[in-house]
């Protein structure tokens, strides 16, 4: 019998309404007890002054495998994940080739198990080759363990295809996630359409691109009542639509990234491609609306949209450089800066959006410290400050605009299935 | 030869010319004053001066251009620089070399000034961050075309004495025009009032936040303005179908002989070229008495000479400042000999 005891931490388990100082006992990879545990022969971790939370979950990452292993692999991405406190991640299917059948899904799982760091899940593509035309084999993929479906990287443009996908998905009790972006409005844009795109002479992506597709999808959800998840929303208009949909009790959820909470379009003013991201960085009004949405409980999950790219790709003209920000390893500190320091959320509120709620969206039995659950636990030093150094990332990529930032909230240990998979300083 | 006639105490410090947005009115005026001095060179029998002797200028053009490229080449040669011509088709860019690699390779050859034209807004800014050479923007996407903006204000100033108080209409595809943007910055900084004229489909996003007024009616504007700059309809940049037909566009926004009858008698008619005759402007107007189009081309040479001269001067000052700073840090690090 293998056991581990985490002593005297501030145990935060939002699913069970726990926020108190205590111990967590792990036996044979499962949570055996939360509360007061007597020491005996166990390995002991002293967590005084630390937060002990369910393992963090990021339901939106890009690990680039298969196809772009020079940017990231499932192994390197998984190492980055546990360094960021994440015990479960969900890979997006826009790889090369995309994840569009059960074999692809199994491949991701196998690589994830082999990496032996974090639990690696994947979503599957909604349509074949992410072309937005023909449905991919969602049934087989769901049976193989895909935790949802999306054509992330682009939205499904044709409303008839989207309606068909939702109707079909109703058979399987899965979530359909959407990168809400109407290409008609987005055009060949590379940043938010607004004052800055005008003076920088860059084509813009109108906020309407996001809002138009989200509005359309919500009408389709009213018809189909399938679980729907709006990925990385970025605009005040999208917040309004989500608010209305939730008021109507539609099965609609949404997620927000750190960059959309911390940056505005103005960051692109020097043509720094590390701020080129899709959906683009918007205006202060949008940032404020997203924070307001988080504080109202309208946002269901915090995600990184970790999108690694090579330096050589980012060292191109702003117009041609790829979209994406790598932030998996420093995500917690970013949320602290964006949400805890300005008192949008308290710690239990933040942890809820990084554990219980995202787990519920993808329907996995994780994100809590309930007795008998697999022991995924993250230990956080909430007061420790550190400098983000992208050069030391375990991720293969360095496209991180937060490089050199000082943030609070350090991951000390990441425990996956009862095993310590990351220890700060190792 | 006194190159700087008006403000002798002004010190030009920039080693790049990326755009006019970040320049002060004084800096713009200084370029114009410097250009005035250089204009005389073209009237001499020996049309050369030595300030860039031994310097290498590369014309790095990723987009088609005839007049701007030739104008820069001639400007550089009048200042006795050596010129390398680098165009997209003739280079390894078509083999997939990145802009950064191209720049590093050119730098390895020891060039001093890069004149770049590129279809991506910000490409000159990107180069300036990644190489030591001076970077001069010869047009980047629809961001800026600073030497065009400068030669436009130079032309107006030369004829009218000042920009202050003048009303200038810029007509056409504002959304995709780097000329409109550079003109706007230069003209408004020098005290002119700028009106953007064109269909709403060719206005940039949030145009109301720019320091201009906007009109959709050339007929309303034509009577009021002192200068009218007719932009070329750039068919290569127009996305979709911003106006139904060339006929309809010309009907509402073409500078016709009829419209000219309602303009001020001394209106200056400008065009950055090349003209689509009969589309944005009728030939009779382009070649008529109010047209200063060829004057613009002529002034472009003096302005580009001034720009090349000044960035080279800026680079020298920059180098001297860096040397001084290096020395200072060095002496700080050295152990002090104390008794």
Image (cartoon, coloured by chain):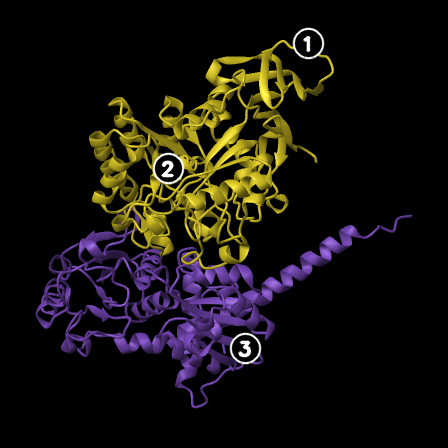
Chain colours: A yellow, B purple
Between the C-alphas of marks 2 and 3, the distance is 51 Å
Which percent across, then down, holds residue B21? 39, 56
Q: Residues within 10 Å of mark 1 (few under 14, many from 20)?
A: few
Task: State the residue at coordinates (58%, 26%).
Answer: A378
Which percent across, then down, holds residue A162? 25, 41
Q: Secondary structure at mark 2?
A: loop
- Disc 1 with disc 2 on a shared chain: yes
Which percent across, then down, holds residue B224? 16, 59
Q: Quickly name the residue at label 3.
A: B56
Q: Residues within 10 Å of mark 2 (few under 14, many from 20)?
A: many
Point out the residue furthest to the right here: B339
Q: Nearer the viewer, residue B327 or A375?
A: A375
Q: Nearer the viewer, residue A320 or A120?
A: A120
Residue B36 visible at all: no
Quarter of the image containing the N terminus of chain A?
Answer: top right
Q: Residues within 10 Å of mark 3 (few under 14, many from 20)?
A: some
Between the C-alphas of marks 3 and 1, the distance is 79 Å
Image-based side of B14 in relation to A223, left or right:
right
Q: Quickly name the residue at label 1.
A: A38
Tell me the mark number nearer the camera, choosing from 2 and 3: 2
Q: Are marks 3 and 1 in contact (CB under 8 Å)?
A: no
Disc assigned to residue A231: 2
Q: Return the chain for callout 3.
A: B
Point out the residue furthest to the bottom here: B45
Task: State the residue at coordinates (67%, 20%).
Answer: A3
> A46 above or below A161?
above
> B240 above or below B211?
below
Q: Return the chain for callout 2.
A: A
């Amino acid at each position: 019998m293998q056991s581990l005891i985490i002593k005297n931490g501030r145990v935060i388990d939002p699913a069970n309404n726990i926020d108190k100082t205590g111990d967590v006992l792990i036996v044979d990879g499962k949570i055996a007890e939360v509360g007061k545990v007597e020491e005996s022969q166990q390995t002991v971790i002293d967590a005084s002054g630390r937060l002990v939370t369910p393992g963090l979950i990021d339901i939106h990452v890009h690990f680039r495998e298969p196809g772009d292993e020079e940017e990231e692999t499932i192994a390197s991405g998984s190492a980055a994940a546990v360094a960021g406190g994440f015990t479960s991640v969900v890979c997006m299917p826009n790889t090369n080739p995309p994840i569009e059948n059960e074999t692809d899904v199994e491949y991701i799982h196998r690589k994830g198990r082999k990496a032996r760091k974090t639990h690696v899940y994947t979503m599957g593509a909604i349509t074949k080759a992410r072309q937005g035309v023909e449905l991919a084999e969602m049934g087989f993929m769901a049976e193989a363990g895909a935790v949802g479906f999306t054509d992330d990287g682009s939205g499904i443009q044709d409303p008839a295809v989207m309606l068909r996908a939702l109707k079909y998905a109703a058979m399987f009790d899965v979530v359909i996630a959407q990168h809400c972006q109407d290409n008609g409005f987005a055009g060949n844009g590379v940043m938010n359409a607004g004052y800055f795109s005008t003076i920088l002479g860059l084509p813009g992506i109108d906020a309407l691109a996001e809002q138009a597709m989200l509005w359309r999808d919500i009408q389709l959800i009213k018809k189909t009542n399938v679980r729907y998840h709006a990925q990385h929303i970025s605009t005040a208009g999208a917040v309004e639509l989500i608010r209305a949909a939730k008021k109507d009790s539609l099965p609609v959820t949404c997620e927000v990234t750190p960059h959309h909470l911390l940056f505005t379009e103005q960051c692109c003013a020097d043509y720094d491609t590390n701020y080129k991201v899709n959906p683009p960085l918007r205006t202060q009004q949008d940032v404020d609306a997203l924070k307001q949405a988080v504080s109202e409980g309208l946002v269901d999950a915090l995600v990184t949209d970790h999108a690694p790219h090579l330096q050589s790709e980012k060292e191109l003209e702003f117009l041609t450089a790829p979209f994406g920000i790598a932030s998996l390893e420093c995500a917690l500190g970013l949320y602290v800066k964006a949400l805890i320091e300005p008192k949008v959320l308290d710690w239990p509120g933040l942890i809820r959006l990084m554990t219980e709620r995202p787990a519920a969206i993808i329907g996995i039995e994780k994100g809590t410290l309930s007795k008998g659950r697999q022991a995924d636990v993250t230990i956080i030093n909430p007061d420790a400050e550190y400098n983000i150094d992208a050069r030391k990332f375990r991720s293969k990529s360095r496209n991180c605009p937060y490089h050199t930032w000082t943030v609070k909230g350090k991951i000390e240990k990441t425990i996956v299935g009862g095993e310590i998979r990351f220890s700060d300083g190792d | 030869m006194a190159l700087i006639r008006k403000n002798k105490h002004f010190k030009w410090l920039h080693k790049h010319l990326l755009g006019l947005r970040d320049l002060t009115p004084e800096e713009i005026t200084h370029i114009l004053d410097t250009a005035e001095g250089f204009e005389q060179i073209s009237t001499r029998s020996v049309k050369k001066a030595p300030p860039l002797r031994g310097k290498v200028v590369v014309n790095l053009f990723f987009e088609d251009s005839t007049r701007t490229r030739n104008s820069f080449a001639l400007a550089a040669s009048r200042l006795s620089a050596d010129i390398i011509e680098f165009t997209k088709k003739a280079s390894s860019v078509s083999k997939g070399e990145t802009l950064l690699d191209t720049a590093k390779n050119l730098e390895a050859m020891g060039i001093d000034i890069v004149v770049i034209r590129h279809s991506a807004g910000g490409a000159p800014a990107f180069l300036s961050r990644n190489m030591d050479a001076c970077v001069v923007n010869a047009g980047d996407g629809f961001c800026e075309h600073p030497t065009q903006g400068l030669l436009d204000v130079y032309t107006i100033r030369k004829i009218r004495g000042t920009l202050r108080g003048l009303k200038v209409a810029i007509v056409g595809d504002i959304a995709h025009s780097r000329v409109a943007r550079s003109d706007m910055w230069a003209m408004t900084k020098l005290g002119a009032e700028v009106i953007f004229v064109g269909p709403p489909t060719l206005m940039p996003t949030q145009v109301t936040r720019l320091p201009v007024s906007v009109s959709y009616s050339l007929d309303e504007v034509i009577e009021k303005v002192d200068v009218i700059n007719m932009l070329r309809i750039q068919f290569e940049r127009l996305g979709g179908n911003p106006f139904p037909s060339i006929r309809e566009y010309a009907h509402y926004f073409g500078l016709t002989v009829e419209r000219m009858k309602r303009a001020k008698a001394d209106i200056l008619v400008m065009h950055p070229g090349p003209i689509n005759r009969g589309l944005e402007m009728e030939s009779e107007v382009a070649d008529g008495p109010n047209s200063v189009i060829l004057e613009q081309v002529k002034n472009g040479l003096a302005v580009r000479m001034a720009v090349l001269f000044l960035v080279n001067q800026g680079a020298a000052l920059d180098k001297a400042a860096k040397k001084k700073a290096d020395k200072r840090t060095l002496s700080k690090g050295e152990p002090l000999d104390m008794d």
